[in-house]
Structure formats: C-alpha cells, structure tokens
Image (cartoon, rainbow, N blue to C red):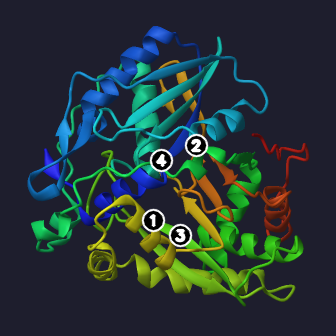
C-alpha cells in the first residue's frame, strides 16, 4: 500500500519490544444488536484503508503497509455496562498487545452491551491511528449502526509526503528481525480512572479560558500542575515536564481519516504560587502555540528523522524514546472534534479520550481528554496512579471558574 513514515516506523519498532497501543471509548445511547455491531465494524473497515492492513518487511528491511481485506476487526462483547466496567475493560485492553503487526487488522473492538446503551472501546496499534482517528471511527460506527452508508476514503499519505520532505529509503531499513516483547510488560498492572465533567463546568471553563486569553487545554495542564502541588507529587526535576500531543490535521488540510497525524509539544512548568492559575494557563498556551505552526511541525519531523532514523530494532527504539521523551505528565486532549452526536435513534453521549502507556516505564502519568455532547471527559491511566488526581483537578478547575457547578458524587475508581 505504502511505506511507513519515520514516526509510524518508530511506533512500530517500539511496539515490538514494549507495546504502545491505545484506546478511545464512546458511550452510545440507544438499542443495538450484536449483529448490527458486526456489520458496522465491517462498514468502518471498508471506509478506512489503514483499518485493514498489516505491516510487512519490504526490500532491505523497509516496512510497508499491506492491505489484507479479508481479515475483519475482532469484536468482543461484554454484557452490561455497570459502574466501573469502562475503567476495568480499558485497563484490561492496555495489558493485551498486538502480538504480531504482520497480521491484519491492527484494530480491535470491545462493546459493553446493554439493551438501551453501549460503550464501545476501540484499541489500535499506534502506527495506524491517533486519538482523533478513533473518535471519528466511533462517530462512523454510530452512523453505520443507524443505517447510514459510509463512503470509502483514500489511502492516507505519509507525513513526509504531506510535508514535502524527501524520503530516503535507506533511512527506513531495519534489522529485518522482529523484536520480542519485554517480559516485564506482562508483570505490570495498569490502573484507569474516569471523570465526566458537568455540562455547566465544561461550558463555563471554555468561556472563562477564552476571557483569560488562553485555552481549555492549557487550563487542564495548569490544573495538573496545581493538583501535583496540592497532592505533594515529587519530581526528580525542579520543574514538571508536560507533554501535549498536537494534531496536525488542520495544518495539513487532512480530514477525518484514520491515520496518525500527531506531533508532540513539550514544556516545563514551575510549581505555582497560590492565585497564579490563569497566569500559568496563559504561559502554557504561549509556550505551546509556536509548536503547532506548520513550519515548526516540519522542523520537528526532520528532527525526529535525525534522532530516531538510526533505530533498527525495537529495543533501540525504546531506548531512544526514553532518552528523548520522559515527561512527568502527558495530556492528550482531543478537544471537541465536532462529532455529530445524533444518528437516527442513536445518540453519542460521551467520548473518553486516549488511554496509552508507552511500554514498561512505571512512573507514566497519562490523561486523555475529549469533549462530546457538551461534556468534557478525563481518563487517567498509570502503573503508579496518584490517588484523587482527577477529583483534585476538577475541584481546582471549579474554584477558578466562577459560576460553575460540580457533580458531587465520587467518581475516582482505580481498577486493576
């Protein structure tokens, strides 16, 4: 189909040694049948080319996507969607790798199925999709469930092609030998917690952030920093290092196709003094904004090729990634992708943004965020979770957004 880009190749190599797959979940209100879910997944796969591929070795060890149209997306049905099941099932999925990228497809689905509502959990190999891709895929599934035909999309170009960078086939070469998964991966037990903010808090947070000359994303990062201080989180560095995946779709005029179109922004944030919340949020936004400019994204792609182009196997990819990327917190915020929330009898009630833990580093703190149907959700994944982190973030946000209200029922459930 086409060769892997440098970033896709890096994730493919990393996943061989230390799995880096991820999930995005959605709550769909309305009655469905298991057979309808099977047909909807087939329609989704026909729409998105990378949802029907495997990764094969080409000449001189260069990996490429190969279409395998006869391999359907695996579907697991779990009856019921009671309290805590989302967290339990996402945590479970993090522990199950894609054992062979040479076998299509590189996506699987779990549906927590009930008579009147369902929660779908999509899990993807990171080389074929990013978080926004799976949010669009959930939207597409709901439309297919409602009987709408899904139009097929073209094969997405590589990052190098989109950015006009010259590709060197020699840089894509690998050792030609697949790495084995680090046994330590199977001895780790991730924990997952979720939080769904009220519509009132979501709306007032967005309005206040705009008034303060910043963004909801920056406010969320500021709430992480404030919560870290309140909860006594320690770091081996004088400042907290924060990582923010940045979508390249608008800058590259790409639509809602499933592929990975993400860059990563990094910044250091000092533990603040009381009362400096919006000042910190503005500083965070100002630091991130230049990193989202197209020219800067092209520069970072060149830097990624220079830094990781010599990785020839999974162990080397993991080692290089740890050297260059070791943030204290990651906030992967899908924002509000503008998903249609109604399709016939079905309604998309909520989306829980990405859950991913890159391999076996035990101190990872990953928060996924997404806004759908007027409500902001948070999904927290970690091997060593910080108790009450999401609740503390919510309290901090509410304190700095006058006129907002909180739902007072506790919703922090750390699950194996």
The reply to whether callout 4 and callout 2 are in contact (CB within 8 Å) is yes
Q: In the rendered image, which quarter contains the C terminus?
A: top right
For marks 4 and 3 on the same chain, the one whose residue lies earlier in the sequence: 4
Q: Residue at x 33, y 82 (%)?
A: 296
Residue 284 location, quadrant: bottom right
The reply to whether callout 4 and callout 3 are in contact (CB within 8 Å) is no
Q: Residue at x 85, y 57 (%)?
A: 387
SS category of the residue bearing label 3: strand
Describe residue 327's horizontal placement relative to residue 15 as left or right. Answer: right
Residue that badge 4 annotates: 21
Residue 409 appears at what percent x and percent y?
90, 43
Mark 3 nearby-residue class (10 Å; few <14, some 14–19, many ≥20): many
Numbered tag placed on residue 318 in the rendering: 1
Mark 1 nearby-residue class (10 Å; few <14, some 14–19, many ≥20): many
Residue that badge 2 annotates: 94
Residue that badge 3 annotates: 244
The reply to whether callout 3 and callout 1 are in contact (CB within 8 Å) is no
Task: State which mark lies toward you, 4 or 3.
Answer: 4
The reply to whether callout 3 and callout 2 are in contact (CB within 8 Å) is no
- The residue lying toward the viewer, choosing from 224 and 110, is 110
Residue 316 appears at what percent x and percent y?
39, 68
Numbered tag placed on residue 308 in the rendering: none
Distance from label 4 to label 2 (Cα)?
Answer: 7 Å
């Amino acid at each position: 189909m086409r060769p892997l880009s440098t970033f896709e190749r890096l994730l493919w190599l990393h996943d061989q040694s230390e799995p880096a797959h991820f999930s995005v979940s959605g709550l769909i209100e309305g009655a469905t049948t298991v057979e309808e879910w099977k047909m909807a997944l087939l329609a989704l796969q026909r729409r998105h080319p990378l949802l029907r591929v495997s990764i094969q070795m080409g000449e001189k060890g260069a990996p490429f996507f190969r279409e395998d149209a006869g391999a359907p997306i695996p579907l697991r049905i779990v009856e019921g969607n009671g309290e805590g099941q989302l967290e339990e099932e996402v945590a479970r999925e993090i522990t199950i790798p894609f054992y062979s990228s040479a076998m299509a497809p590189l996506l699987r689905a779990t549906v927590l199925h009930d008579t009147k509502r369902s929660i779908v959990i999509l899990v993807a190999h990171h080389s074929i999709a990013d978080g926004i891709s799976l949010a669009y895929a959930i939207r597409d599934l709901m439309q297919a469930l409602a009987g709408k035909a899904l139009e097929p999309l073209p094969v997405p170009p590589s990052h190098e092609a989109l950015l006009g960078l010259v590709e060197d086939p020699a840089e894509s070469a690998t050792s030609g030998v697949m790495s084995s998964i680090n046994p330590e991966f199977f001895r780790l037990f991730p924990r997952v917690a979720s939080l769904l903010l009220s519509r009132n808090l979501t709306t007032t947070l967005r309005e206040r952030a705009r008034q303060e000359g910043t963004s909801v994303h920056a406010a969320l990062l500021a709430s992480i920093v404030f919560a870290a201080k309140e909860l006594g989180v320690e770091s081996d560095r004088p400042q907290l290092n924060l990582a923010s995946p940045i979508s390249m779709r608008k800058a590259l005029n790409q639509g809602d196709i499933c592929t990975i179109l993400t860059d990563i922004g990094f910044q250091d944030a000092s533990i603040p003094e009381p009362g400096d919340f919006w000042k910190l949020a503005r500083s965070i936004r100002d630091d991130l904004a230049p990193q989202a400019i197209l020219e800067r994204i092209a520069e970072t792609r060149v830097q990624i090729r220079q830094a990781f182009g010599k990785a020839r196997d999974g162990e080397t990819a993991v080692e290089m990634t740890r050297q260059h990327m070791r943030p204290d917190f990651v906030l992967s915020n899908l924002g509000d992708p503008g998903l249609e929330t109604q399709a016939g009898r079905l309604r998309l009630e909520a989306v829980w943004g990405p859950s991913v833990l890159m391999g076996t580093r035990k101190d990872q703190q990953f928060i996924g965020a997404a806004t759908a149907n007027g409500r902001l959700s948070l999904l927290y994944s970690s091997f060593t979770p910080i108790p009450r982190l999401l609740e503390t973030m919510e309290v901090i946000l509410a304190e700095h957004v006058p006129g907002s209200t909180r739902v007072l029922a506790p919703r922090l459930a750390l699950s194996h």
